[in-house]
Image (cartoon, rainbow, N blue to C red):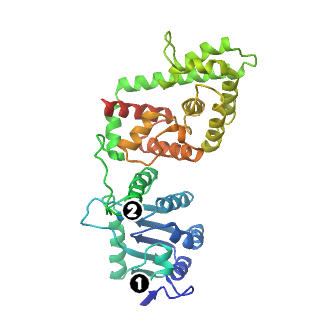
Amino acid sequence: MRFLANINETNNHCVVLSEKLKQSDEAYFAVAFLKMSGLTILSKPLIGFLKSGGKLTVVVGQNFALTEPKALLEFRNMFRSYPKSKIYLAKANSKDSVFHPKLYLFKSKKSCSIISGSANMTKGGLQKNKESSINIDCKTKDDTWIDAIGYFNYLINPSNADEADLLVIKQYESFFDQQKQHNKKTKSIPTRTKSRIEFDYANLVKHFKKFNTPERQKNFKEKQNNYREARKVLNQIADNTRLTQKQFEPLLDLLVGSKEAYSLWHSGSLFRLRRKVYPHFREFRKLLIYIRDNKNQNADIVFDRAKEMVKNVNGAAVNYVTEIMMTYNSVDFANINRNPITVLKEEGGVKIKAHSSSYKGVDYSEYCDLVKEISLKLELKNMLEADTFFNEIYWKIKY
């Protein structure tokens, strides 16, 4: 048994945890608070541990919104290359039960270690604060280890914690920002307006199955056909080196609709300002050629450049950009407009920008990641089907 405290730069929790990571094959961290400051000072030994084949499981608390969403995202991104390792966010369902452990477990072929005390995964907890812990070395067959690892597994049980995927993190981020702005009125758990659609994956699956009728499948098939036709129309515009405004106008009407025709695209707002777009057919053509030529590039890069280009097309904005992007690549590029944003913000409690016009490439890329994650969990085919699903939810909650 060994007593640990933050004494100086060479004798503190960070130094000991770093040593244990070098000696171990598996590590399990349960901390009430996780901050970038703690993750940063441990990043080098953590990455070395993962590269050597180590398996790391982390569960952190959300009470009082002291865990930083950026640190959760950093762990999530770190673990992308190491799928055996997982990060969890403890549920916060009751004011009477706060998630508050500071437990670090290490396991190798020969031995195990348990470190438990007052140190959270923050720079203060690991280096600067007056913190103390007890380090117990033991064997895997010892009752102490069996009890400790059993308790850790209890903490990450689905009834007690959620794997910190992007949806979970973005929902928590809303609570984090709320608490930051109202820190004088401290809350220990997130409070959200009760959603008319319970927005977790189990309930979303139920909701999807309820609407996954032959009629819905027929409607989605029709929408797929429309977007295939939209791609052909876009190619007609892009490939016509001698395009005139007279040729352009009926092609644009096919995409956004007119009094005489139903639109291939499904964003109703595009129809109203289409006449302003007509004279800017050359700039519109340059925009869609850029998107078509870069349809397999990173979403943030394409979005940022396209958003700049669409400024030269009077009457068009981000809604045109993402319709074109999704038409050319419905696997990686999502459409953004009022309907899905409303569903994610108001029903899902997700922290995303409310207006597509304010999105930058990094916001759009994260939005695409979120929609892609939801699509994967619900077994949706692509961004187009996800867009259809969000529209169904939107119209359900509106009426």
N-terminal-most mark, 1 or 2: 2
Say if mark 1 contacts mark 2, CB within 8 Å.
no
User: Which quarter shows the C terminus?
Assistant: top left
Q: Does residue 138 appear anywhere in the picture? A: no
Camera-nearest label, 1 or 2: 2
Q: Position of residue 9 (x, y in %)?
A: 56, 85
Please state if 360 lies on the left or on the right of 207 as rendered.
right
Quarter of the figure with residue 184? bottom left
Q: Position of residue 368 (x, y in %)?
A: 52, 42
The numbered mark at residue 49 is none
Q: Quadrant of residue 43?
A: bottom right
Up/down of 167 relative to 321, above or below: below
Residue at the spot x=33%, y=62% of the render?
157
Q: Disc 1 and disc 2: Cα gap in Å?
A: 24 Å
Per the image, label 1 sits on a secondary structure element best described as strand
For label 1, the crowd category at 10 Å Cα-Cα, with few meaning under 14, some 14 to 19 and many 20 or more, is some
Q: Secondary structure at mark 2?
A: helix
Residue that mark 2 sits on: 65
Q: Residue furthest top?
A: 260
Residue occupying the far front of the picture = 184
Quadrant, the N terminus: bottom left
Q: Is residue 200 left or right of residue 127?
A: left
Q: Nearer the viewer, residue 170 or 1?
A: 170
Please give the label number shown on residue 133. 1
Q: Which amino acid type is shown beneath numbered disc 2? A: Ala
